Image (cartoon, rainbow, N blue to C red):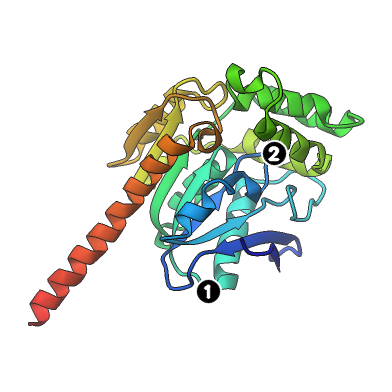
Amino acid sequence: MTETLHFTAGDGVRIAYRLDGPEDRPVLALSNSIATTLHMWDGQVPELAKSFRVLRHDFRGQGGSDAPAGAYSLDRLGRDVLELLDFLGLARVHFLGLSLGGFVGQWLGIHAPERIERLILSNTSPHLGPASYFDEQIRNVLAASDLSATADMFMRNWFPASMLAGKNKTVAEFHAAILAMSPQGLAGCFAAVRDADLRRPISLITAPTLVIGGVDDKVTLASHSEAIAAAIPGAELVLLPGVHLLNVERPVEFMDTVTRFLRESQTIAASELCEHRRFLV
């Protein structure tokens, strides 16, 4: 895989990103969960990079990106993506977002429809509450001497009991990544989720959309995925057996679902090209 690079957003914050795959392929942007880094997708990138130019980035506050103090907004996280696309000269991309990445995907579909080819929203919601829950999480991470308790909470929310029983290398890596995070960066991302409410405007999304949910997701419930799919015209819904980080817990089923949906775009493009050539003849 390629090295991590950086670009500077309009407000001076440095954002970490990576590009993998051939430069002449369609671009697929991956956007990860809160409290994770772009390495959340390491298991999927080798396969996806065979067909796509894969773009990943760390949210401000997470991983290799800067962690400015204060509350972040979904608008700012969405603009970070648009500014990264502009920096790389990418006019239009496929976008796959999971959890907080799915919030950003919804925002992009609403506010920048001309930039999104196909949209995949996994284990996400248009709104999570109550706000008091996130206020408590923000207080906890800023007051704690370390993020052990927060990391333990995320592990319980992200993975099934079978993965949490005994030693598990994957769970240990995600746990360690949280311990290394900036508390103020994590607090800033919690604020972005707290203040996001896309329940009404998601009906404006026009991109072909696939919604993936986990039957046993404890955070973004299967009912949240169903609500998103019902609100977006023509959206497809797939519920997989699993909890929250489906790309990690159920990688085969997750990738089969994602690649099938993305192949439809390639099939349509090939069909349109054939029709165009037929018309010219």
Q: Is residue 52 left or right of residue 166?
A: left
Callout 2: SS: loop
How dense is the environment of label 1, judged by Cα within 10 Å: few (below 14), some, or many (20 and up)?
few
Question: Amino acid under label 1?
Answer: Gly
**What quarter of the picture does the N terminus occupy?**
bottom right
Instruction: Give the residue at x 89% y 29%.
Output: 143
Residue 158 percent coordinates (x, y):
61, 27
Disc with the residue nearer the chain's start (2 vs 1) = 2
Q: Pointer 1: what residue?
A: 89
Is residue 273 visible from the viewing direction of this image? Answer: yes
Callout 1: SS: loop
Question: Amino acid under label 2?
Answer: Ala
> 214 above or below 178?
above
Q: Is residue 73 left or right of residue 273?
A: right
How dense is the environment of label 2, judged by Cα within 10 Å: few (below 14), some, or many (20 and up)?
many
**What quarter of the picture does the C terminus occupy?**
bottom left
Residue closest to the far right: 145
Residue closest to the far bottom: 281
Closer to us: 191 or 272: 272
Closer to us: 240 or 250: 250
Residue 115 percent coordinates (x, y):
44, 62
Tag on residue 143?
none
Q: Pointer 2: what residue?
A: 35
Residue 84 percent coordinates (x, y):
60, 65
Is residue 203 visible from the viewing direction of this image? Answer: no
Name the quadrant containing residue 234: top left
Instruction: Give the residue at x 57% y 25%.
Output: 219
Instruction: Give the residue at x 70% y 36%.
Output: 174
Name the quadrant containing residue 55: bottom right
